[in-house]
Image (spheres, rainbow, N blue to C red):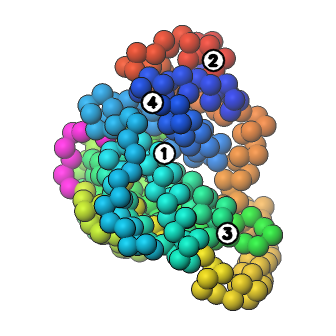
Amino acid sequence: MADAYLIHAEPLGAAIRELVRGFGSEQREVELVTDNLIQANLTGHDSHGIGMLPRYSEAWAEGGLKANAHIKTLMDGGALLRVDGQAGFGQVVGHEAMTLAIERAKKFGSCIMALGNSHHLCRIGAWAEMAVAEGFVSIHFVNVISRPIVAPFGGRDARFGTNPFTVGIPVAGRDPILLDFATSVIAQGKARVAHNKREKLPPGRIIDNEGRDSDDPAYAVVDPLGAILAFGEHKGYGMAVACELLGGALSAGLVGGPATGERRVLNGMLTIVLDPKAIADAASFERETRAFLDWVTASPPRAGFDKVRLAGEPEREWRAKRLAEGIPVDANTWNELLEAAVRLKVDPAKISRLAGVKS
Ligand SMILES: NC(=O)c1ccc[n+]([C@@H]2O[C@H](COP(=O)([O-])OP(=O)(O)OC[C@H]3O[C@@H](n4cnc5c(N)ncnc54)[C@H](O)[C@@H]3O)[C@@H](O)[C@H]2O)c1
């Protein structure tokens, strides 16, 4: 058996569509879930790609993830919205909530949208991309309701999730800025990917179940669990707390706590969508943005770097490469997907056939 398979986006998408049908999803849901996960792989974030589906299938089997659920509006103040994701696929309810927020930003110049009770919203950058495509700024504070996996600064055990923070900024005539990261030093899925590939982590990423420094990604994946550290020490930790309070307590009305053993992953998200033309002088915003980005990226590269990049650029580079060469899927992840197929009563041989994988 190969250690990894290199699969082009199209056949991989066909296989994943077939798998997602196993949830009993309507066609639009099949498309949204598949496209979102494949896009995460294409942008280099395997931690948030098709490798999430085994976890989704376990959450679905327990009743923690609902197929064919849609957003329900809980509060509609025009440019102020609160919606409930009804434990539906984040790929669907996230898309619906963002569509609504963008519609309102077009009408009012801005919209603050609180989304709670969404199943995993996956790569938060995907939601900023929707707003940026309309020429809007988009800011997201997100909390995670799942088994805690990140330790507070100075603490020796996990107390919260990898709470991502994301900002999208359109740049006239150029690619947008897309800053999108977990407030943990690595996303939990990156530890899962390293664990599946039997790789070690660099120092300063993880502590073991006794609170000691470790390089073993297993401490973020299987029992006994340790914890991932927050990025930037007290600063990333503080940002994670802000994400928990804004995405969780404020938007979702639900914050993380001790592990419950459930397999679902819920996200709460506070989103601010802003039309720059509605608040700023469009000409000076465009001019100053371009001038600053030119100035910053003209910094001569340091040893070990080929150039200075802007947020969003690595993802575009990954996308171009993987669209041309294919998406690498390690054998452990592929086997987990086939196990998920069995759970979803989908023929695993058909999944392999559609992807062109000979296992
Ligand atoms: N839904 C959830 O519960 C959840 C939780 C955590 C993370 N996530 C997602 O996981 C994904 C991965 O997060 P991560 O923290 O591993 O990301 P990461 O560490 O790869 O950082 C990504 C960000 O840094 C930028 N970047 C990377 N290299 C750069 C360089 N050389 N120069 C300039 N900018 C650079 C990228 O463009 C991007 O904005 C994100 O999409 C995030 O939304 C989701």
Give yes or no for residue 259 being in the magenta stretch: yes
For marks 2 and 4, give the one nearer the viewer.
Answer: 4
Which is in the foreground here, disc 1 or disc 2? 1
Residue at numbered disc 2 = 354
In magenta stretch: residue 233: no
Label 1 close to label 2 by CB (< 8 Å): no
- Residue type at numbered disc 3: Gly
Q: Which of the two residues, 24 or 127, is positioned nearer the viewer here?
A: 24
Question: Badge 4: how crowded within 10 Å, few (<14), some, or many (20+)?
Answer: some
Mark 3 in CB contact with mark 2 (< 8 angstroms): no
What is the three-letter code of the residue carrying label 2?
Leu
Q: How far apart are marks 1 and 2 (CA)?
A: 23 Å
Task: Where is residue 103? Give x, y as percent.
Answer: 55, 64
Amino acid carrying mark 4 in the image? Ser
Residue that label 4 marks? 25
Q: Which residue is drawn at 25% across and 62% down?
A: 253
Q: Nearer the viewer, residue 190 or 56?
A: 56
Say which element carries label 3: loop
Tag 2 or tag 1, which sits nearer the N-term? Answer: 1
